[in-house]
Image (cartoon, rainbow, N blue to C red):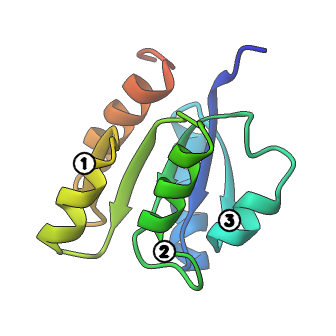
Amino acid sequence: MRKDPNSVAIIDADASAGVAMSRFLRGVGFSPSTFTSAESFLADDRRTAFAALVLDIQLPGMSGLELQRRLLAEGDRTPVIFVTAEDDTAARDLAIQNGCAEFFRKVDPGAVIVAALRRAAGAGERT
């Protein structure tokens, strides 16, 4: 089954940040779903249908880095883009070492995040 390149999961403990990201991505042609924890994402039946994940580092319970490691251990190669408030070089290095597609801070421009998400999800450019 081919994944819909517009279908993305946003996993962010800050519900308002997740909603804001969801609205933004919907406005540029994505079909986002939001989750406030790694555990809620893992429990969702649609988890394997997403073309890419937008993931925060700091989550309640399992961290974003732990989720990334778990997905890799399970053989799930869905591209991960970290978008986080954390300015932690060690976390960034670990995320990249574990194969994240991109790593951004929440203050980075939305256009660069969208471009990275399109590349990772295979969604292509839209006008």
- What is the x, y in percent for residue 114? 38, 38
- What is the x, y in percent for residue 63? 48, 74
> Given contact means CB atoms under 8 Å apart, are the residues at marks 2 and 3 in contact?
no
For the point 24% across and 51% down, which residue is it?
109
Q: Secondary structure at mark 1?
A: helix
In this rendering, position of residue 90 left or right of residue 5? left
Q: Quadrant of residue 90?
A: bottom left
Q: Quadrant of residue 107?
A: bottom left
Instruction: Please tell me whether mark 2 or mark 3 is closer to you in this view.
Output: 2
| Gap between marks 1 and 2 measured at Cα | 15 Å
- What is the x, y in percent for residue 78? 55, 35
Q: Which is nearer the N-term, disc 1 or disc 2?
A: 2
> Given contact means CB atoms under 8 Å apart, are the residues at marks 3 and 1 in contact?
no
Which residue is identified by label 1? 96
Q: Which is nearer the N-term, disc 3 or disc 1?
A: 3
Which residue is identified by label 3? 35
Q: Secondary structure at mark 2?
A: loop
Binning the other alpha carbons within 10 Å of mark 2 as few (below 14), some (14 to 19) or many (20 upward) gives some
Q: Residue furthest left?
A: 89
Q: Secondary structure at mark 3?
A: strand
Which residue is identified by label 2? 63
In this rendering, position of residue 120 left or right of residue 38? left
Binning the other alpha carbons within 10 Å of mark 1 as few (below 14), some (14 to 19) or many (20 upward) gives some
| Quadrant of the drawing holding the N terminus | top right
Q: Disc 2 residue type?
A: Ser
Height in image: 99 above or below 119?
below
For the point 72% across and 14% down, which residue is it?
2
